[in-house]
Amino acid sequence: MSASSTVLEDSSRLSWADRTLFRFESVLALLGGVVIFLLVFLASANILGRWLFDLPIDGYVDWVEQAMAFFAFLGLAYTQRLGGHIRMDMLVGNLHGRLLWLSELVSALLMFLITLVLIYGSYLHFYRAYQIGDSSLDIDLPTWPAKLVVPVALGILALRLLLQIGGYLRGVLQGGDSPVAVPLIEDAATVAAKEAEAVMGSLDNGGTK
């Protein structure tokens, strides 16, 4: 299922680091959204240019291919912080307290190790493209900037996972149901109630205007 979550805060250094990194992750997610917004304009210009003037944008496919890395990867850490990635929690959803945080700790550790492997492989892929001057087929657009985005975004994801490992470890040691700096997964009823509240709030704002 797709998780929805709340992240608690306090005055600890862990929570401060969580909030600081989240501001940076939010900027990256916004940049990914800007890229999508620009691609919409690019697609519209390409379609209108082809239809009205028989002049499609040169290298349109190349630009789209390079842009995909930006909007696909820049929001990884942001989504991880909010607990928004797809996950199966039929078993984990029935756990509570230290046992729950221990299972989440193991999952975060495994994700962190896999992310480190992906960082290494994607960096080698970027470095090889940079060394040989790899470019796109149509307009010879350099491919290394898009390939550099992958290890950078994964590196930020690794930092986020480190913070969450610290949060889950703190939960294991201290117990309780409310550790900071980690997404607290909500049940389906709570998620539905929040979504309904958000929809009603947007309708009320629209009616007020």
Image (cartoon, rainbow, N blue to C red):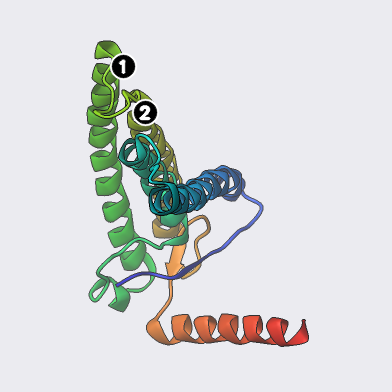
Determine whether label 1 and label 2 are within 8 Å by CB: yes
Where 191 falls versus 81 (above or below)?
below
Q: Nearer the viewer, residue 137 or 123?
A: 137
Left or right of residue 24: residue 158: left
| Residue at figure coordinates x 28%, y 23% from the top left | 135
Using the image, tell me which numbered label, if any, was put on residue 130.
1
Residue 100 on image: x %, y % = 33, 67
> Under tag 2, what secondary structure?
helix
**Amino acid type shown at disc 2:** Leu
Mark 2 nearby-residue class (10 Å; few <14, some 14–19, many ≥20):
many
Q: Quadrant of residue 21?
A: top right
Residue 175 visible in the displayed image: no
Residue 51 on image: x %, y % = 39, 54
Quadrant including the C terminus:
bottom right
Residue 171 on image: x %, y % = 44, 59
Q: CA distance from mark 1 to mark 2?
A: 9 Å
| Residue at figure coordinates x 38%, y 69% from the top left | 3
Q: Which residue is mark 2?
A: 148
Q: Quadrant of residue 130?
A: top left
Where 107 falls versus 191 (above or below)?
above
